[in-house]
C-alpha cells in the first residue's frame, strides 16, 4: 500500500529530474563553444592573410604632376617604339580633327620632314608651362643619326582623361584651341 509520503517522494524525484535537465546538454554547449572559437580563429586567419585592398586611384587632374608626367611618358614611349596607332589613341578629338584637316598621319604631323626616320629616344625636358586648363611640356625626339627635334606637346583633360591636344614644331605657330 502506498502512503502519502511515497507520493510526495515520487513527486519530488520527478521535479528534480525536470530541473536537472539532460546530461548531454553540457557536452552540446561545449561543442558549440568550441565550434565558435575554431570558426572565429579561421575567419581571423583568413582576414589577416588577404592582401589589403588597393586604394582607389586619385581623380584625374592636370594639377597632379605624376599623372601629367605619366601621360607624356606614355605618349613618348609609343613614339619611341614606333607605335603611332597607340599614340593616336592618346589624342583629343580636336587633335584628331586637326589631323583629318591636314590629311596627314600623326607621324607626319609630329615629325614633319623627319617622318621617315626612326626615333631612337623620346623624353620630356624640364621646360614646360602649367595653367588651369592645360599643361605644355617640351619633348625631345632623338633620331638614329644623332639629330634631335624638340616638340612642345599640350596636354588637356577631356572626358575625364588626360589627352594630347596639340603639338607644334618650333618653326610652326602653335594654335590655341579651346575645348
Image (spheres, rainbow, N blue to C red):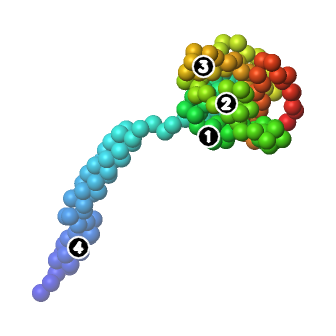
Query: What is the x, y in percent for residue 13?
Result: 20, 70
The residue at the point 87 percent across, 32 percent down is 178
The residue indicated by pointer 4 is 14
* CA distance for labels 4 and 3: 102 Å
Apparent side of residue 45 relative to residue 151 in the rendered image (left or right): left
Query: What is the x, y in percent for residue 7?
Result: 20, 78
* CA distance for labels 4 and 2: 105 Å
Residue 22 visible? The answer is yes
Query: What is the x, y in percent for residue 3?
Result: 16, 81
Counting residues from the start of the chain, the first of labels 1 and 2 encountered is 1
Decide: is 22 above or below 97: below
Question: In front here: 32 or 175?
Answer: 175
Counting residues from the start of the chain, the first of labels 4 and 3 encountered is 4
Counting residues from the start of the chain, the first of labels 4 and 2 encountered is 4
The residue indicated by pointer 3 is 142
Q: Which mark is residue 86?
A: 1
The residue indicated by pointer 2 is 115
Mark 2 residue element: loop
Mark 1 residue element: helix
The residue positioned farthest toward the bottom in the image shown: 1
Question: In front here: 126 or 103?
Answer: 103
Apparent side of residue 145 relative to residue 179 in the rendered image (left or right): left
Q: Are marks 1 and 4 in contact (CB under 8 Å)?
A: no
Counting residues from the start of the chain, the first of labels 1 and 4 encountered is 4
* CA distance for labels 3 and 2: 13 Å
Amino acid at each position: 500500500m502506498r502512503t502519502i509520503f511515497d507520493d510526495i517522494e515520487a513527486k519530488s524525484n520527478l521535479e528534480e529530474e525536470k530541473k536537472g535537465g539532460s546530461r548531454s546538454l553540457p557536452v552540446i554547449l561545449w561543442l558549440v563553444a568550441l565550434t565558435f572559437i575554431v570558426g572565429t580563429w579561421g575567419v581571423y586567419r583568413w582576414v589577416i592573410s588577404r592582401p589589403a585592398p588597393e586604394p582607389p586611384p586619385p581623380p584625374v587632374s592636370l594639377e597632379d604632376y605624376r599623372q601629367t608626367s605619366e601621360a607624356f611618358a606614355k605618349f613618348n614611349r609609343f613614339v619611341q617604339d614606333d607605335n603611332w596607332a597607340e599614340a593616336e589613341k592618346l589624342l583629343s578629338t580636336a587633335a584628331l580633327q586637326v589631323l583629318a584637316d591636314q590629311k596627314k598621319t600623326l607621324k607626319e604631323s609630329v615629325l614633319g620632314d623627319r617622318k621617315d626616320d626612326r626615333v631612337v629616344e623620346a623624353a620630356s625636358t624640364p621646360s614646360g608651362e602649367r595653367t588651369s586648363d592645360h599643361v605644355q611640356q617640351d619633348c625631345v625626339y632623338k633620331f638614329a643619326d644623332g639629330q634631335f627635334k624638340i616638340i612642345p606637346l599640350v596636354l588637356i583633360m577631356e572626358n575625364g582623361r588626360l589627352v594630347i591636344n596639340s603639338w607644334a614644331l618650333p618653326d610652326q605657330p602653335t594654335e590655341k584651341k579651346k575645348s
